[in-house]
Image (cartoon, grey):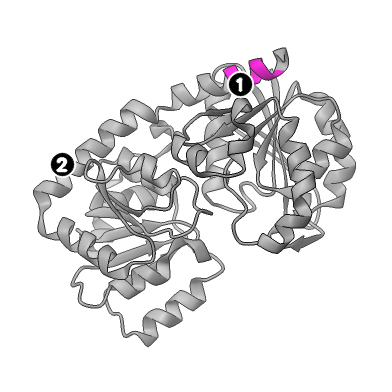
Amino acid sequence: MNILHVYRTYFPSTYGGGEQTIRQIALATARLGANNRIAHSGRIEKFESHAFAEGTTYAYPQNFELASNTISLQMLKAFPQLAAWADVIHYHFPWPFGDLLQLSGASGKPYVVTYHSDIVRQRTLQYLYRPLMNRFLSTAKVIVATSPNYLASSPILGRYRNATRVIPIAVDEDCYPTPNPARVGQWRSHLGEGFFLFVGVLRYYKGLHILLDAVPGLDVPIVIVGAGPIEKELKARARSMGLKRIHFLGFQTDEDKVALLELAKAVVFPSCLRSEAFGISLLEGAMRSKPLISCEIGTGTSFVNVDGVTGIVTPPNDAYALREAMLRLHNDSGLAHQYGRAARQRYDTLFRHEQMGERYMQAYQDALRT
């Protein structure tokens, strides 16, 4: 079965949760017989193609960007040929240009949509986009929500409930390296251990400004792994606040991430807006038996992290509650271990890679039949 994934970006142009999700879906379905191609735009000068284990990428130069919506005229021109190869097209929403690609270059081709997130920030432009979005979603054969929480709380998905099913995101443990003792030792000598770890792209909705506000009075190191558009702003804020025990490490490889997870007390994930639909980093922490701290924003973060079971869920934008959650785990190692074991057990039960692959293959088969 030929599957064409379509999204605004992918590896190696960018690194983030959306890209990782597509990679994990493609890897899981490739093992079950899917032949995957991944078409995307990127900040590149000319067309590029890369062969990965999950499939072949087709990267087209973006011409411009409007409110995070990238436009690639070369991709628009090439799309009919890309679509002709596919048995099923798999769009990753939201990307309004992807809706346009379907309507202009793949008429009649069955397609599946993974609904990663509502459009949260661009509310004014959303009114202009709504007719195109409604037409795109209403003709999808299958719409996938990544958690029951997001399906229940999204006003958009509520309109398409009959076409929507839940397939939780999963990560394959075999994709991650085993912690290298030498690398772990290097990080231990630099940072110590028992710190609280954030991993992710540094974006406005990640709630990292709240994390910084929670640090004063907390005699525990905070380690932030990742780069992104607000990195300079966050570093300047930390300097102005005189924060000494917060470490910005920038982008790190998977080998370094697993080493840091090995040393961390817990994963802290303070995302405060619905743009954070799931939280791959929470799943990676659960995979490594780490207790989790997140915020209740009505999305998949509270599907991965269940308050009082796998960790602590705090109100969003509440620095005091976030500080208290970190202090609680810092001061009670028994509780932290209990939550960490439960997080791993939940990962084993709900977020296995094989389950995700089987469910997506079923979605593709259903799309072909209807």
284 relative to 85, above or below = below
Q: How many marks?
A: 2
Residue 318: x percent and y percent? Answer: 33, 67
Q: Is residue 280 left or right of residue 19?
A: left
362 relative to 125, above or below = above
Is disc 1 surrounded by few (<14), some (14 to 19) or many (20+) residues within 10 Å? many
Residue range of the region highlighted in magenta in the rendering: 362-367
Residue at x-position 54% and y-position 44%: 154
The image quarter in which residue 93 lies: top right
In the image, 205 versus 19, the foreground residue is 205
Marks 2/1: CA–CA distance: 36 Å
**Residue matched to label 2:** 338
Residue at x-position 70% and y-position 25%: 141
Check the picture and name the quadrant holding the C terminus.
top right
Residue 184: x percent and y percent? Answer: 27, 53
Q: Is residue 119 left or right of residue 330?
A: right
Q: Can residue 54 be seen in this snapshot?
A: no
Q: Amino acid at mark 1?
A: Ala
Residue 83: x percent and y percent? Answer: 81, 30
**Residue matched to label 1:** 363
Give SS at disc 1: helix
303 relative to 185, above or below = above
Q: Amino acid at mark 2?
A: Gln
Residue at x-position 9% and y-position 47%: 334
CB-based contact (under 8 Å), mark 2 and mark 1 = no
Residue at x-position 44% and y-position 45%: 280
In the image, 193 versus 86, the foreground residue is 86
Is 363 inside the magenta-drawn segment? yes
Of the residues under marks 2 and 1, which one precedes in the sequence?
A: 2
Is disc 2 surrounded by few (<14), some (14 to 19) or many (20+) residues within 10 Å? some
In the image, 193 versus 234, the foreground residue is 234
Q: Can residue 80 be seen in this snapshot?
A: yes
